[in-house]
Image (cartoon, rainbow, N blue to C red):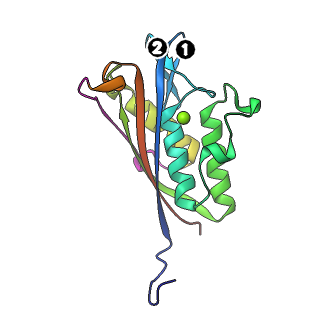
Amino acid sequence: MVKGAKDCGFRVGIGYDIHSLVEGRPLVLGGITIPHGKGLLGHSDGDALLHSISDAILGAAGLGDIGTHFPDTDPAYRGADSAKLLGFVVELVAKEGWQVVNVDANVIAERPKLSPHFGEMRGRIAGIIGIPVGRVSVKARTSEGIGAIGRGNAISTHAVALITKAD
Ligand code: MG
């Protein structure tokens, strides 16, 4: 450790994910199902928002990423409920003595309009992590018509999480 550097007891982590939007799958995002003609392709339920939040929490604790803990080559995680994966992640960091302080996330999607679903998403995410809803933020942007996201063929997500040593 650098001489004089104090450990403030907090850690921050970042997460990113992107999934294709395809016909014939339900759109599961932020732990809820949103009416839309397409859904996110993935080995699991494809919930890119919960994946980036899970990676942010794991990253903050220095515990790798969800690919390390839940490999997509493992048939056990086929069609997996990403809410359960996030729950495992929270338990994993708790075993190391960490608790989540807050989460902030961006979803980049051309369609569908997500703002009407933010309240339900935040409530679900807060419930899975076990923190008050006021500590979970979800925001959305379009891709201004640019690229695969702009054509409505993919959704990407970014998240940051702050964790602290549990009391
Ligand atoms: Mg993913």
Judged from the image, the secondary structure of the residue bearing numbered disc 1 is loop
Q: Which mark is residue 25?
A: 1
Q: Position of residue 94 (x, y in %)?
A: 65, 58
Instruction: Give, as a three-letter code, the residue at label 1.
Output: Arg
Quick one: 103 or 146, which is closer to the camera?
A: 146
Q: Looking at the rendering, in which quadrant would you find the C terminus?
A: bottom right
* Circle 2: element type: strand
* Total numbered labels: 2
The residue sitting at 32% across, 28% down in the picture is 115
In this view, the residue farthest toward the left is 144
Q: Image quarter for residue 127?
A: top right
**Mark 2 neighbour class, 10 Å CA radius: few under 14, some 14 to 19, many 20 or more:** many
- Give above or below for 40 relative to 94: above
- In the picture, measured across the screen, residue 6 lies left or right of residue 96, that is left
Residue at the spot x=45%, y=84% of the render? 5
Q: Position of residue 148 (x, y in %)?
A: 36, 23
Quarter of image, res 144: top left
Above/below status of 11 relative to 3: above
Q: Are marks 2 and 1 in contact (CB under 8 Å)?
A: yes
Q: In this orientation, which residue lies closer to the viewer: 41 or 131?
A: 41
Q: Is disc 2's CB within 8 Å of ligand 1? A: no
Say which amino acid is labelled 2.
Answer: Lys
Q: Is residue 136 magenta?
A: yes
Q: Which residue is mark 2?
A: 38
Of all residues, the one furthest to the bottom in this rendering is 3
Q: Quadrant of ligand 1?
A: top right
Segment colored magenta: 131-145
Residue 154, percent from left and from top = 42, 24
Q: Is residue 43 left or right of residue 59?
A: right
Find the distance from the CA under tag 2 to the CA under tag 1: 6 Å
- Assess disc 1: are there few (<14), some (14-19) or many (≥20) residues with their C-alpha within 10 Å of its C-alpha: some
Nearer to me, 21 or 112: 21
